């Protein structure tokens, strides 16, 4: 093969490996915005609850049974703690970082289990347990957070500058797991215990609604939002083969 041909292959391969650059979100006054709402459901029966093994600090962590929170399904089949975003919206309400996002360590579990917030927001990490925790994040875009939080240090503040889905754990208690979802725009929601969500004041236009769930992955669907209109975007997600037995 010629040198030119090899160079072309290298360029194409590099383009496939390079992340697509994020567009620049723009703020504008939204007039006659619409609403997107729906429900995120689990296909089929929900797996049974899995109790976590508490192996340390049982006087605090073992006061009540702790259960795996990676897939919480309501009595109606709705999935809680899924993050719904408009993946491709380019302009709308101002992207305003928050200063009061709370992430508590209480009973040796994270409350809430999943938090979502605009990129640039500051998270207040709370230690309600009064024992040693160590917050440790898994991220590739934002700097990794790895901080000990003794019982006397009630709060730690961390700012997440860039959009990313970040897994959070505790080096002192290996069963603890939570998630931070830093969004690229202000149009997002977390599903409630019944799997329902609502995103308001969306500028009229065509968008992609995206659902992320830590165990089930990502689902997408297109929507068209009319002037001062309400649009439904429901999702049904399913466990991969073998995940049912893992529960």
Image (cartoon, grey):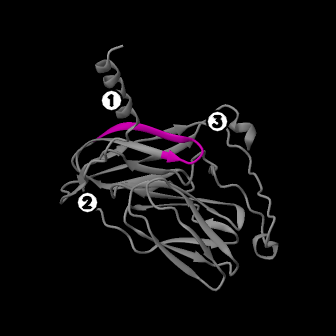
Residue that lies at the very extreme toward the bottom in this rendered image: 152
Find disc 3 in the rendering and name its residue: 44
Whichever of callouts 1 and 3 sits on the residue coming sooner in the sequence is: 1
**Quadrant placement of the N terminus:** top left
Range covered by the magenta-colored residues: 212-224
| Residue sitting at x 72%, y 65% | 173
Tell us which disc is closer to us: 1 or 3: 1
What SS does tag 1 mark?
helix
Q: Is residue 141 above or below residue 225?
A: below
- In the image, 236 versus 110, the foreground residue is 110
- State yes or no: residue 109 in magenta: no
Q: Is residue 40 left or right of residue 224?
A: right
Neighbor class of circle 1 (other Cα within 10 Å; few <14, some 14-19, many 20+) is: few
What SS does tag 3 mark?
loop
Report the Cα–Cα distance between label 2 and label 3: 37 Å
Q: Is residue 169 above or below residue 43?
A: below
What SS does tag 2 mark?
loop
Q: Is residue 95 left or right of residue 69?
A: left
Find disc 2 in the rendering and name its residue: 93
- In the image, 182 versus 37, the foreground residue is 182
Q: Position of residue 159 (x, y in %)?
A: 43, 69
The answer to whether marks 2 and 3 mark residues whose Cβ atoms lie closer than 8 Å is no
| Residue sitting at x 20%, y 57% | 30
- In the image, 165 versus 220, the foreground residue is 165
Find disc 1 in the rendering and name its residue: 11
């Amino acid at each position: 093969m010629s040198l030119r041909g090899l160079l072309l292959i290298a360029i194409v391969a590099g383009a496939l490996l390079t992340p697509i650059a994020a567009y620049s979100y723009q703020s504008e006054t939204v007039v006659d915005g619409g609403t997107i709402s729906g429900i995120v459901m689990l296909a089929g029966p929900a797996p049974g609850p899995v109790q976590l093994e508490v192996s340390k600090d049982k006087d605090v962590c073992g006061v009540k049974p702790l259960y795996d929170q990676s897939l919480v399904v309501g009595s109606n089949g709705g999935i809680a703690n899924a993050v719904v975003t408009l993946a491709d919206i380019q302009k709308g309400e101002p992207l305003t970082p928050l200063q009061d996002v709370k992430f508590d360590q209480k009973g040796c579990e994270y409350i809430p289990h999943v938090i979502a917030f605009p990129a640039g927001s500051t998270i207040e990490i709370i230690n309600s347990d009064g024992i040693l925790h160590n917050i440790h994040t898994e991220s590739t875009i934002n700097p990794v957070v790895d901080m000990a939080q003794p019982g006397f240090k009630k709060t730690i503040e961390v700012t997440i500058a860039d959009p990313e889905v970040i897994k959070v754990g505790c080096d002192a208690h290996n069963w603890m797991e939570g998630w931070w979802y830093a969004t690229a725009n202000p149009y997002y929601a977390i599903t409630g215990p019944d799997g329902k969500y609502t995103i308001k004041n969306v500028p009229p236009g065509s968008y992609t609604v995206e659902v992320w769930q830590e165990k089930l992955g990502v689902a997408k669907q297109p929507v068209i939002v009319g002037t001062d209109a309400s649009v439904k975007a429901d999702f049904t997600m399913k466990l991969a083969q073998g995940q049912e037995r893992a529960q």
